[in-house]
Amino acid sequence: MNINTRIWENSIAGLPKEDQQAEQFEHYAREFFIPDSIAPSVYLANVGALMEQAAEESGVQPTPSAAKMALSMQHPIGFPTWFLAAYPDVALWFTSQDGPDRKAVDAEVTRRSAASGAAASHLVDENGFFAHAVLRTLIDLYHERTGSALECTAPDTDLQEEGAAGSTDEQVLTAQQAVDLMAANITRYERELATSYGDRFAGIRPRLTVAGLLQLGYYVLVDHVIPLATLIQASDESASADDPVVEFVERLEIEVFCAEGGEGERKRIEEACHLLRSRILDVVLQTRADFEETPSLTEATSNFMILPQFESLRQVIGIRPAS
């Protein structure tokens, strides 16, 4: 199993049982995302762009085709959002076909779909979207007729089989950068919350929880591999530490690496993350100093604190209503 597949499998394993949306997501992952090596982080960035959500602080940008659709405000008809996010280039390629080219593509879609057992009357589902057999055929035709790789394809390093040779210093550096990014973002979010919304928090515990949620929203709200209760527990256990933010970041790093690498590795991951504590401290202190010099308020923070769709989360976390 490669790293990319493991991330998807961990996502599936954390889905709620007997939930229709969860079952649908598992189908998308197993029938489309995993076989086509779709990168989860790029998929999420595209979802955010297409849904007009605030950009994550992960540094992952939407692909060119997804960004183009987001700017135009017009999405190709017949395609569900999950497909547009994972295969935006395929959707734009199909809609760009006209004249004889479009007729040829339509004929081939009908022929291949029929060969797979889909009747002509079942090429569109009850929601008005192309049936999955049609979507799979369009992906295949895109490859065949353009010779292009999918924009959302994961990088080669994430497609290497785990345990195979090729664990490079560059990969280690990437992990260190991920640790630095999480430490910096959580520190900044906590400072923004304390500075701009301090009167709505009863101490640092709920501020830490919100900062963690802003950083790990994908894991908590989309993938469901890290429960919100885990963030709340981590903030409770970190509040009495010498530096609550440093302690909180270390605890969340452990949860993220366990979500991606498996619970069986928790002991090893805890030891590795503890060795990074001094690095986390350095990043936290530097980020605080930078914030004091140039205070800011990111859109992600303000959106969470004011938009009505986050009211239920604010109540669960214990944030006071705006006065």
Image (cartoon, rainbow, N blue to C red):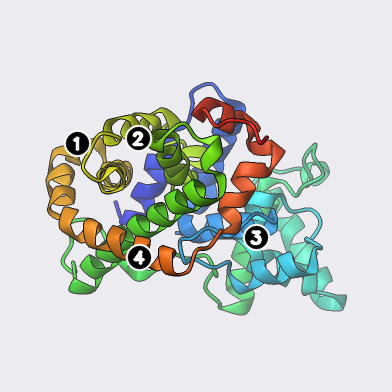
Q: Residues within 10 Å of mark 2 (few under 14, many from 20)?
A: many
Nearer-the-camera pick, 263 or 98: 263
Q: Is residue 74 above or below residue 247?
A: below
Query: How far is the residue under mark 4 from the one under mark 3?
Result: 32 Å
Q: Taking 276 as reference, is 142 left or right?
A: right
Residue 218 vertical placement versus 299 (above, below): above
Residue at horizontal 37%, vertical 41%? 10
Horizontal side, residue 249 vs residue 97: left or right: left
Q: Is residue 208 visible?
A: yes
Q: Amino acid at mark 1?
A: Gly
Q: Which mark, residue 49?
A: 3
Residue 289 badge: 4
Q: Secondary structure at mark 1?
A: helix
Q: Kindly report the distance in space between the C-alpha atoms of the residues bearing marks 1 and 2.
A: 24 Å
For marks 2 and 4 on the same chain, the one whose residue lies earlier in the sequence: 2
Classify mark 3: helix, strand or loop. Answer: helix
In the depicted view, which residue is nearer to us: 15 or 132?
Answer: 15
Query: Where's residue 263, x and y in %?
Result: 24, 36
Check disc 1 and report the residue beneath it: 264
Label 3 or label 1, whichever comes before in sequence order? 3
Q: Is 130 drawn above or below residue 89 in the view shown?
A: above
Disc 2 versus disc 3: nearer the observer: 2
Pointer 2: what residue? 235
Residue 86 in the image: state x and y as whole percent: 58, 58
Q: Is residue 159 visible?
A: no
